[in-house]
Image (spheres, helix red, strand yellow):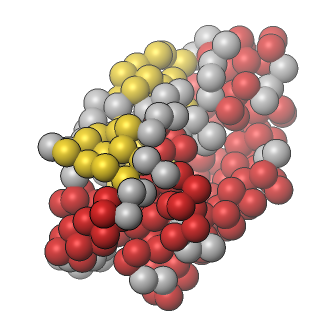
Amino acid sequence: MSKNNLINSLPKETQELVLAKADLVILTLSDNICVFDKPVENLYFPIDGFISITQSIDKHPPIEIGMIGREGMLGAEVILGSMTNPFGALVQGSGNAWKMGVNDFLTHIKNIPEFEAIVDSYLTVRINQLGLSAACEHFHEIGPRLAKWLLMSQDRAHSPTFQMTHEFIALMLGVRRVGITTTAADFRRRGLIEYHRGEMKVINRSALKAEACSCYQKNRKIYSSVIG
């Protein structure tokens, strides 16, 4: 029914109960759907759109610390009592999502044990992935990180082709644009990817996986070990 993995994991009757309080919305590319330190108003369960989780320090531009597609949700932290956004969220890939008001979400958490359990599990995944992201940004070079990031984007776009610019990738990875341009040009020369006017296409996924840092597979293992 929902095409969001978390909701789909629930019994059919529970899915219907949860979605009765949700609206199907379109995630528009580059929209800021939550702002750091502002009150949480809505939570999102992506279907075929995907979201970059961002964080900024002092006056530096925001950097991506996570990515959410149909495998997860945006806003799970409210079950811990956090009613302000701990980070920002930017739509990286346009598409559909279920949107739920925070009060309806908390009512579901209180009254539907299966829903609370799957959200708890996903929050465990997010905490582990955030720790891995911090280590990755410190220890891994641009090339392996870019390969990982392209694979993660393709996974959530559910297509080898998705909208992306070098400037946006550099911003999300927290590196200079010239580094992304040089590395992407090398990937294209070797037949891993192709790009033109803001459109990125993965040509050789196997070769790209060989280039990616170990964090790509570790992220997938974290998710599968907790949620399946």
Looking at the image, residue 17 lies above or below residue 215: above
Q: Is residue 179 above or below residue 193?
A: below
Query: Residue most toward the front?
Result: 190
What's the residue at 48%, 45% (across, down)?
Answer: 154
29 and 147: which one is in front? 147
Task: Work out which quarter of the rendered image holds the N terminus and state it.
Answer: top right
In the displayed structure, 205 sits above or below 64; it is above
- Whole-percent x and y of residue 131? 60, 74
Q: Quadrant of residue 183?
A: bottom left
| Residue at left offset 19%, top offset 45% | 196
Q: Which quadrant of the view contains residue 30?
A: top left
Quarter in which the C terminus is drawn: top right
Which residue occupies the foreground of this view, 152 or 64? 152
Residue found at x 38% / y 38%: 161
Percent x, y of residue 81:
60, 53
- Residue 163 at x, y percent in the picture: 29, 40
Q: Is any atom of residue 67 visible in this view?
A: no
